[in-house]
Amino acid sequence: MARRHVLLVTFPAQGHINPSLQFAKRIIDMGIEVTFATSVYARRRMEKTAARDLPNGLSFAAFSDGYDDGFTMSDDPNKYMTEIRSRGAKTLKDTALSAAEQGRPVTCLIYTPLLPWASEVARDVNIPSALLWIQPATVLDIYYYYFNGFADEIIASSNDPSWKLQLPGLPILLSERDLPSFTLPNSSERYSFALTSFKEQLEALDVETKPKVLVNTFDSLESDALKAIDKYELIGVGPLIPSAFLDGKDPSDTSFGGDLFQKSDDYAEWLNSKPESSVVYVSFGSLLRLPKAQMEEIAKGLLDSSRPFLWVIRANEKANEEKKEEDERLSCMEELEKVGKIVPWCSQLEVLTHPSLGCFVTHCGWNSTLESISCGVPVVAFPHWTDQGTNAKLIEDAWRTGVRVRANEDGWLRVVR
């Protein structure tokens, strides 16, 4: 009997790659072969930063998304989604057919959100598929009910500050700021592709009877949300975090293994020099770039706190060095460097498990949220878009593992002295 073989297709963003690679490692331990497919650009970046040998049984299949030198903020994301669909679908089909010819047929195709067309590829080559949902189950429930009876209410009522939404099966009341940003009428046209993609995703699931959806969560965290949609079987497979920081069964599993950014190498020594539970860790993830004026406000708040801090500020890698420094240098940089440490990237789990850490100021991306919960670190939630508002709601009101900042009407955080 041929060895089971999963083709795992991942949208080329850090928030998709990390849980997907961890899921791959989990099923490889079960004797399953995995071919990990993502874009050419993402694969190149992963090769440069790989922290350790990846497990036997894992191979890669890169596909072009039309942006092999990287996607920039000046590029059109709607055009990008068209390109990744047309180019990726052909490559994945060829990959599956080639594997069959080599005597190692793909027995299941698993894919992350924003790639609903991957399920069509699976049907074309007559293999089963499953969605690996890398956001909380609650967010999948919200999208489902948005497209199944609640869109009109959300669109009509979301500007009413007193409005609350109760969705079937979910125990929490949701206001406008608690919903995924793509469901709101004021969502940026630039990201209109996202809601369309989620609608296509649900339509792809509806082709099957009682489809199974693998969710990066766990039963005791989202027991109600995992049961809120009768027609789907949501299965918690998380938290998808390296074993060394979770259950300790594999002490050598200390990183996800697919960073798109080069981490700094001197923050660990700095953390070692700080008292227990004293450091404020600030990071807003791999995608979000805050306006400089907002960064200045955060800098003022950190200085006013008189606490040592570790702040991740990613460099704009597409800008030249001179423009980088001119655009990104904060006015109080010298004062900041006396109190804290600023790095372009780091191993977040290494930081979250360090004894010197006191709290985590986060954008509330789902990976960061799960990591903070798994490591027992309280958070200050500063959500901005996509699922982050929902995650912040869960953090503050459902799980009580942190507090949410109160931004002004423009979504800005101001320091009040």
Image: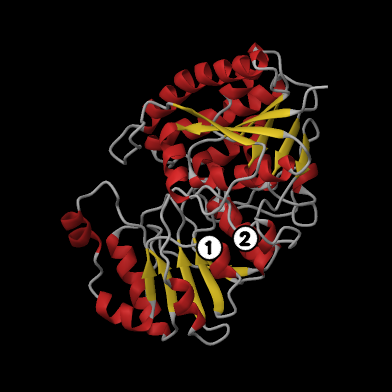
Circle 1 sits in a helix, a strand or a loop, which is it? helix
Question: What residue is shown with label 2?
Answer: 371
Left or right of residue 115, residue 300 in this image: left
Q: Residue at x 81, y 34 (%)?
A: 230
Residue 163: assigned label: none
Q: Residue 272, how many percent across, how many down?
A: 51, 81
Q: Badge 1: how crowded within 10 Å, few (<14), some, or many (20+)? A: some
Q: Residue 180, how many percent across, how many down?
A: 55, 45
- Residue 105 is drawn in which quadrant? top right
- Residue 137 is drawn in which quadrant? top right
From where the camera sits, is residue 414 visible?
A: no
Circle 2 sits in a helix, a strand or a loop, which is it? helix
What scheme was used to colour the molecule?
A: secondary structure
Residue 348: assigned label: 1
Q: Badge 2: how crowded within 10 Å, few (<14), some, or many (20+)? A: many
Identify the amino acid type marked 2: Glu
Q: Nearer the viewer, residue 294 or 286?
A: 286
Identify the amino acid type marked 1: Gln
Q: Residue 227, how many percent across, how many down?
A: 80, 43
In the displayed structure, 83 sits above or below 285; it is above
Q: Residue 127, how many percent across, how many down?
A: 71, 18
Q: Quadrant of the C terminus?
A: bottom left
Q: Residue at x 61, y 42 (%)?
A: 20
- The disc, 1 or 2, on the residue closer to the chain's N-terminal end is 1
Q: Nearer the viewer, residue 46 or 132?
A: 46
From where the camera sits, is residue 98 visible?
A: yes
Callout 1 touching callout 2 (CB < 8 Å) = yes
Q: Residue at x 53, y 39 (%)?
A: 183
Left or right of residue 69, residue 263 in this image: right
Q: CA distance from mark 1 to mark 2?
A: 8 Å
